[in-house]
Amino acid sequence: MKKLRIGNLIDLSLIEIITLNLLLEYGKPIVRYTLYVIVNELIQNNKINVNKFKDINLSEYEAKYLEYTEKKEKSNSDLSTSSFYNNLSNLEKRGLVKFNLNHKRRVQTVEATPLTNYLLKYLLQFFMDSSVIPDVIQFDEGLTDRIKKISNKDHLENIMAVWFSKHIFLRLISLFKTLADEVFILSKKENYENYTETELMDIHISEVYKKTIREPNDFIEMVAIPDYKKNTNFFRMNEVEVLKELHRILQPGGMIIVVTKADFPLTDDVTADLLLKIYKESISDTIFTEEELKSDLVKAGFTKNKMIDYQGCVVGIGWVE
């Protein structure tokens, strides 16, 4: 089955997402006009309480927000039936809702399809991964200080950042620039032409040829993998094969920092557990025990290693002897 890309859903409106969610919640066919009334009441009666933001300085932006919303209040901001029905037709064409017709072949009731639950779950996983709960650990001051103490190094000759994804985390690159004279990056990304010269200024872009990283033996002082995963396919290499290549290019005494997610327990709250299960499923390939991570490092040749816990993550540190 062809994989679904988030870009294929980019034109789904907020109204359509709310509608899909309500259909799932209702669980059976509902009269089309009744569905419209519920959706319209929901979007009109749910309001953002700006007072909740009083603990941070929002005066300038808050004024703009309130001015905008006041203008909207003066106009007719109700959702029209024709607009809502058009949204429903759009969802029906995509196979995300089912129309049940009456004897006059007019839409009488609407219901969710088997795809609806999958789609909303997919969207939730995407937003949880990318914003609500970041998928990459913050290489913040605390973790950086711990690594400095363990390595006994305040500054490096060079460092390589390896991403198992195509997404490049520019914030980490900026941090690595402060830690080393030279920064190398290696990822699945095919080209970097859309990045400005400022964003990748003085950065070396590494490559892989026939399962071999371009850099020579004993060259890199430290490697960081902020998104280490199971079942990866990195230039036709699995995760352990990648670690072996990184072991090859590291200097004697060089270090590798591998960041993974630690497993986490559920709670006694049904709603919280539902969200936690969805999140855990979406990041299952990044969850490691200390034993699993240590095993991968040992298989790659890092016989000297150390595991540390940090903010819900397992961080593996390996040395080249």
Image: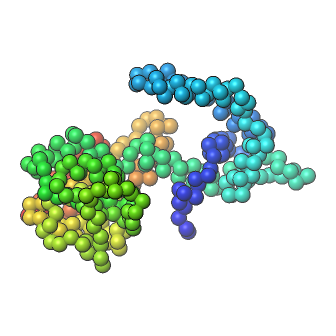
The answer, for residue 311, to whether it is visible in the render is yes
Q: Quadrant of residue 184?
A: bottom left
The single residue placed furthest to the bottom in the displayed view is 210
Q: Which of 18/269 is in front?
A: 18
Please name the residue shown 58% across and 54% down the image.
Answer: 9
Q: Is residue 122 left or right of residue 105?
A: left
Image spot of residue 69 (x, y percent) = 61, 28
Q: Is residue 95 above or below residue 312?
A: below
Q: 172 or 274, which is in the foreground?
A: 172
Quarter of the rendering occupied by the N terminus: bottom right
Q: Nearer the viewer, residue 172 or 14?
A: 172
Which quadrant does the C terminus fall into? bottom left
User: Outermost residue, front direction?
Assistant: 197
Residue 287 shows up from this direction: no
At x 37%, y 49%, the residue is: 135
Q: Quadrant of residue 21?
A: top right
Q: Is residue 36 above or below residue 50?
A: below
Q: Quadrant of residue 238?
A: bottom left
Along the horizontal axis of the image, is 46 left or right of 31? left
Residue 308 in percent (x, y) is at 20, 47
How far across and down, in percent of the image, does residue 47 sit? 59, 27
Instruction: Determine the residue positioned at 53% across, 52% down.
Output: 122
- Residue 70 left/right relative to 192: right
Q: Residue at x 46, y 23 (%)?
A: 59
Colour mapping used in the image: rainbow
